[in-house]
Amino acid sequence: MRFGVPQMTERIIPIAEARYPTRPPVIPADAAPASGLLLDTRGRRLHDLRLSVTDRCNFRCTYCMPKSVFGTDYAFLPQTSLLSFEELTRIARIFVAHGVEKIRLTGGEPLLRRGIETLIGMLAELRTPQGVPVDLTLTTNATLLARKAKALRKAGLHRITVSLDAIDDAIFRQMNDVDFPVADVLEGIDAAAAEGLLPVKVNMVVRRGVNDSQILPMAKHFRGTGHILRFIEFMDVGASNGWKMDEVLPSGDVIQRINAVFPLAPIDPNYGGEVAERWRYQDGAGEVGVISSVTRPFCAECTRARVSTEGRLYTCLFATEGHDLRTLLRGNYSDDQISAAIANLWNQRSDRYSEIRSDATAGLRRIEMSYIGG
Ligand code: SAM
Ligand code: SF4
Ligand code: SF4
């Protein structure tokens, strides 16, 4: 027997919440308890969880939150729409029982969420069915990192990923579009490293003709620091960044450019399903990575679930519809019922957007990256 969640016909839905389609999940009444292993229709296990803790950001990166869309009148979600720390921890606990071993906090800019250290402390208490702490990390633009690194580490954060799209100050200021200087991001990276949030990963989205001139200067800057620089192909996420295939610089070209100056050799992945391809400098100055979401899709090994700021589950970054877990969290539903709903959704998952991407699919209306997290 199956039963659905009562419809919220009487409730006034804030406009910001009505922006993207969603539906309440079905709760199978006869579900087995979580076994620590969930597989989808393509045999992919549920292993990673990305939790978006805010849809707000203090940057307006032109490829993510362009000012033309995210202007001063943009309606961000009200505080009451956001999952509380208790709700986030409850949902994370249920996901961990289903086999999630790695949790990444993201956004928007996650360090803007007030009291984020408290949430990290709560998540750090979680244990896998094998009794192991969950690998806890966070992606940030680093504007608040120098100030917060110590508290984040103390709360139980393990590692950190910093986004930085250029080492040239003028190019960086132009890309974040709020005139934020590179030096402050570098200070944040140093503070994170000093606190032991290691290894620090630095992500650079490469947009041909915008910041591809920065590939070599970035490589040069981070060689020998122990930080791992990763180049990400510009993706057609959301519906506001005006994505064009011409602006994607294939990762193969990135590697060629670096290799011509600093010879590289491939290295094995850390684990099966790792999305970044790893390369090491032959002179021993460390490693770089490339994430080729467009030219070499990794859908076949995609083990990630994403929960948006107000508690909608997305089984793909390019999904057009989310599943409203918050209604279950705020309704009279037990952990077992929510667990059964999540298992049912993952079991039915068949997403493989990057394998079928085309000019036609690039124009589809989708959720924004700042809402669901990278
Ligand atoms: N604000 C934080 C930050 O920038 O690190 C976390 C959220 S941000 C959405 C997460 C990551 O998504 C960032 O590294 C960002 O560069 C990346 N991103 C955003 N839009 C993208 C796009 N169109 N293609 C590829 N990566 C993108
Ligand atoms: Fe903000 Fe991150 Fe998006 Fe830039 S990429 S606008 S820092 S959420
Ligand atoms: Fe995973 Fe969807 Fe990206 Fe494919 S397109 S790798 S299924 S998030």
Image (cartoon, grey):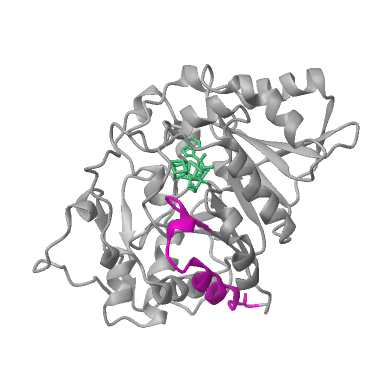
| Image point (58%, 68%), residue name | 99
- Compared to residue 245, the image places residue 192 above or below, namely below
Q: Determine which quarter of the picture holds residue 211.
A: top right
The location of residue 285, given as percent across then percent down, is: 85, 37
Q: Is residue 62 magenta?
A: no
Residues 170 and 328: in front is 170
Q: Is residue 273 visible?
A: no
Magenta-drawn segment: 105-129
Point out the image quarter for the N terminus. bottom left
Q: Is residue 317 visible?
A: yes
Q: Determine which quarter of the picture holds residue 112.
A: bottom left
Residue situated furthest left in the rendering:
10
Q: Determine which quarter of the picture holds residue 250.
A: top right
- Quarter of the render that holds ligand 2: top left
Residues 190 and 263: in front is 190
The location of residue 317, given as percent across then percent down, is: 44, 45
Q: Is residue 108 magenta?
A: yes
The location of residue 239, given as percent across then percent down, is: 33, 34
